[in-house]
Image: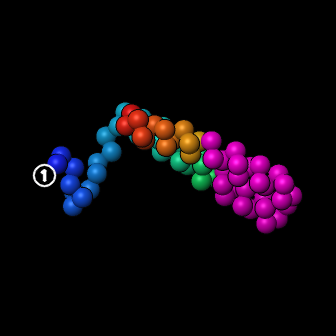
């Protein structure tokens, strides 16, 4: 059996766990702001906000894949 079994939960002990959590919070806040702006204000600006919110998510994904 390999080191990580599907039956056991994965424990994230990476050095950058706190940074990754803050990047996820930033992503969620920016995406929610974009959605609210889309429903209440200018749709073009809202789309740009949502596109910009993807940047911290990609950074978090890179840190997670690199297992830092």
Q: What span is colored magenta in the figure? A: 30-55
- What element does badge 1 sit on? loop
Mark 1 nearby-residue class (10 Å; few <14, some 14–19, many ≥20): few
Look at the image and say whether residue 31 sits in the magenta stretch: yes
- Residue depicted at x 51% and y 41%: 60
Residue 7 visible in the displayed image: yes
- In the figure, 64 relative to 35: above or below? above
Q: Is 7 or 40 nearer to us in this picture?
A: 7
- Residue depicted at x 63% and y 47%: 54
Residue 6 placement (x, y as % from top left) = 24, 58
Residue 33 placement (x, y as % from top left) = 71, 55
Q: Residue furthest bottom?
A: 39
Query: Please, which colouring scheme is shown?
Result: rainbow
- In the figure, 8 relative to 18: above or below? below
Residue 27 placement (x, y as % from top left) = 60, 49
| The C terminus: image quadrant | top left
The tally of labels here is 1
- Residue depicted at x 33% and y 45%: 12
Q: Indicate the quadrant where residue 40 lies.
A: bottom right
**Which residue lies under the disc numbered 1?**
1
In the image, taking residue 38 as reference, residue 53 lies left or right, namely: left
In the image, taking residue 32 as reference, residue 42 lies left or right, namely: right
Look at the image and say whether residue 8 sits in the magenta stretch: no
Q: Could you tell me what secondary structure mostly forms the magenta stretch?
A: helix
Q: Residue furthest front?
A: 1
In the image, taking residue 19 as reference, residue 47 lies left or right, namely: right
């Amino acid at each position: 059996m390999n080191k990580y079994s599907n039956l056991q939960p994965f424990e994230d002990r990476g050095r950058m766990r706190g940074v990754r959590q803050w990047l996820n919070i930033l992503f969620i806040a920016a995406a929610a702001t974009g959605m609210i702006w889309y429903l209440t204000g200018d749709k073009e600006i809202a789309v740009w906000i949502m596109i910009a919110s993807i940047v911290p998510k990609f950074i978090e994904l890179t840190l997670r894949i690199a297992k830092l």
